[in-house]
Amino acid sequence: MINVLLIEDDLMVQEVNKEFINKVEGFQVIGIAGNGKEGMELIHRLSPDLIIIDLYMPLMGGLETLHLLRQKNLQVDVIIITAASDIETVRHVMKHGVFDYIMKPFKFERMKQALEHYQSVQNRLREKGRISQEELDSLLFQKAGGPDEAELLPKGLNAVTLQKIVLYLRETNKPLSAEEVAEGVGAARVTVRRYLDYLEKSGKVKIDIQYGVIGRPINRYALA
């Protein structure tokens, strides 16, 4: 069993989240805290595998608790559940190595997806003394709780390569040509163009056509 500590100040949300977590096979809630201060005390006493924590709470919020966890080098994984959707908060939290970030309101399926992904990663890491790049990519980019993304892609497209391109576009945060994307992800331009065409047809990227003084217009791609 994976032991979970839930840190949430809203009593009704506590009960809903506890029910969601206990419904997923292999997980059990072993403690509930109403703020980060209580949460830290329970972490030392119960040694949970996973913490599911809100950000906005009295006495000690989620961000302060997360800082303290990393400062003390406590070996526990963290999933954030919060209404915060601003980019600065998301970026700040991700820098502290959280496993997942779930925005309120959410449905049971999203919680189940996060927990099953976590369970899958932990099981695979326990099985192996060493891991290949391909296996690591599969773990990092897998989509739990639904069909394998590779099964949904057109023939010849790879889910890991697709994810690398999407992440590069997100990190760069400006329209890029196929050549620039290819250079950024370390792939051939003709290959990258096929992925960009797929993303454009599926509505995930938009094309910004730029006209120069001389020559043909250049298609630049950005996340929609």
Image: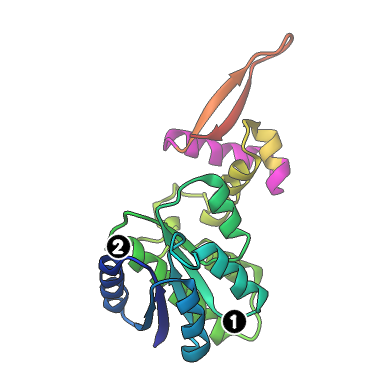
Q: Which mark is residue 47?
A: none
* Percent coordinates x, y for residue 170 in the rendering: 58, 43
Q: Residue at x 68, y 48 (%)?
A: 185
Name the amino acid type tagged 1: Gln
Q: Secondary structure at mark 1?
A: loop
In the picture, measured across the screen, residue 177 lies left or right of residue 123, that is: right
Disc 1 and disc 2 in contact, CB within 8 angstroms: no
Q: Residue at x 50, y 71 (%)?
A: 78
Pointer 2 local density, CA inside 10 Å: few below 14, some 14–19, many at least 20:
few
Q: How is the image coloured?
A: rainbow
Q: Main secondary structure of the magenta part?
A: helix
N-terminal-most mark, 1 or 2? 1
Does residue 88 lie above or below 214 as drawn? below
Give the residue pinned by disc 1.
75
* Percent coordinates x, y for residue 25 in the rendering: 31, 80
Q: Within the image, what quadrant is residue 92 found in?
A: bottom right
Start-end of magenta stretch: 183-203
Q: Is residue 163 visible?
A: no
Q: Residue at x 56, y 33 (%)?
A: 222
Quadrant placement of the N terminus:
bottom left
Give the residue pinned by disc 2.
109
Q: Is residue 6 visible?
A: yes
